[in-house]
Amino acid sequence: MPDNYKSKRVTWSWLRLEGVSFTILPFEDRDSVLRDYAGLLASIKRGVLLARRVDYEYKYSDYSFSVSDTAFYLRAPAGSQVVFFNPRPEEPARPRVKRLVNPATLELEDGSYARVLVAYGFPAGLPEGLLYTLYTEVSEAALVFREVDKVKAVRMVETARRRRITSSSQGVTEAHEAGALEELASRVLSGSSLFEFYLYFIIKDKEPKSLNTRANTVKSLLKGYGVDVDAPPIQRELYNLETCLGVMCIEKHYADSESLKPLFPLISEELHDPNGVFLGVSGTGSPVLLDVWSKPNLNFVIVGVTGSGKSMTAKVYLKRLREVDDKILYVGVDPESEYTRVAGLLGAQAVEIHENQRLGLDPIKLMRSGALEIGQVADIISEVYGVPENLHGVLRRELFMNSDFADSFVEFASSVKDPELSKYLQGATVPPDSLVYEGEPPPLAGSVIFGLKNVRSKRLKILISALISSHSYNTLLTKARRSVFFVDEAWLFMETPSIVSLFENLARRGRKHGAAFLYITQRAEDLARTPQGRTILEQSATVLLLRQEPEGRDACKEIYKLSDSEAEYLVNAPVGSGILKAGRKRITIQVLPTEGELKAFSTTVS
């Protein structure tokens, strides 16, 4: 078909529309989308909404994945002012009809066979998102609509309503239909637009026999919703989308914009960020390409219980990110040394830290270099050494008055004048703590992952993690064009508000340096328990929710406004499957590691 063509004195044009990840939106956001949909129908008054699935092979490295995309188009009168769903001029690349094989089958120019199934029977109610459930089975779904003149619309619904009300057969079904007509009549009389519409589905296959099988599958699926479909013997006209041009004689259906909401077609589970990292496929089989630098902020949270695939996902993401940008720098805090054993594959140096090792992570020196502020040092030291709240101000005052005169933190802790505070800081002056502060810090010439498995004390892990994070950020990440700071098993730090606050502060400062922060953690409920952790969950532009325990499910449901079915899905999600929130998009995803990645990144250590 040409871009513009005339029929009944109407010139038609094609627009490409942007889909919405509708099925997992909160209900209030769904209502907003459906209002835009109603506005679209009312503003152009007549046209075709077309959803097309395109199957293809997506290649990553030496691997090939069978995937599909769904594209959405609007055929509207030329010059229509369309302001909804980000329209842009584009005609769908639909193969033309080559010949009619039989009354119900077309052969197309691309060598495939097609059949058009028209919906001719609808129940009184349909579920929202009906068309989306069929996108994996049909090649195209078309909603053809035309607004009915107001006077005619009022007369039609009133006549239909009276006929139904006075019908001699008033069973349960008839009574329900009468009630639905009563509501429709009320809305039309109140000014709602009435539309004449047709709904049909185009299925394609390589062989006529397979086409029959696919047609029966679609019929069966629709029958489950109470929708009857058939293939009228006017296949060529149907395929060419000529219904709204008045050349056909198939049964008309009527509805207002409220009644058409269940047939909202612009439902997309696709995330294709330019230059994004290939993570896997969406619920509709479309490749997911993620670029966190294109989002409102650079925080990325991966949450999932043990065995959900969270660490595998993080490693796959980091490896493929380096393949997209080989100049990117990584700094990782790895409490269980899970990433250090594959650091080479991530293009990073592995540094294993031991309890009795001189690390040169002196808070006084970090403060002087600008890596830490006085308040941050005070908060970290207070929590690590159990300084009571009534002495926090004393510690800050001592740091402010005396830190410039001390050569090291050990010297500072030994010379604190307040006798009560001095008791709490004695642990800092002897091993293993003093060794953390003594010596020279690890050299940072490039990407590095710090493994802390050999640090048995949780308290020391927290102390070292806080100091080495600040040192790495200040020394390395601020000088990089783009970088990633990641923390695995982040839940270990969630009971330490000062550490969470430090991570949050580093992430906030990191935005101007292009430093993305990746948090990998088991339990969403642990993050949600503290104000700082909840802030990380709520304000991270990118979040991947993998399988959850019931407690984590409830936290995710409350924070991200998930429906009951979505929250339940997270409890039973297969390994590597979950819900990805990325900016304004929210999709389901299956992460797809290659065989080589599975072997290299397995958490089973030989």
Image (cartoon, rainbow, N blue to C red):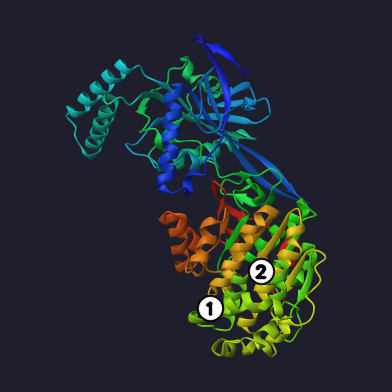
Most foreground residue, 413 or 325: 413
Image location (x, y in percent) of residue 359: 75, 79
In the image, residue 431 lies at what x, y percent? Answer: 70, 90
As drawn, the label of residue 4 is none
> In the image, what residue occupies the spot 35% across and 28% down?
256
Image marks 2 and 1: residues in contact by CB distance under 8 Å? no
Residue 447 drawn above or below residue 237: below
Q: Quadrant of the N terminus?
A: top right
Amino acid type indicated by mark 1: His
Residue 315: quarter of image: bottom right
| Residue 338, image x, y percentages | 70, 72
Total number of numbered labels?
Answer: 2
Classify 10 Å Cα crowding around label 1: few (below 14), some (14-19), many (20 and above): some
Residue matched to label 2: 372
Would you place residue 10 above or below residue 332 in this image?
above
Describe residue 487's horizontal placement relative to residue 195 as left or right: right
x then y, percent, for residue 605: 71, 76
Residue bearing mark 1: 392
Q: Which element type, helix, strand or loop, lies under badge 1?
A: helix
User: Quadrant of residue 598 in the image?
Assistant: bottom right
The amino acid pointed to by label 2 is Leu
Is residue 580 in sight in this rendering?
Answer: yes
Q: Is residue 275 left or right of residue 557?
A: right
| Marks 2/1: CA–CA distance | 17 Å
* Element marked by disc 2: loop
Q: N-terminal of the two: label 2 or label 1? A: 2
In this view, 59 is above or below 260:
below
In the depicted structure, whether residue 353 falls above or below residue 6: below
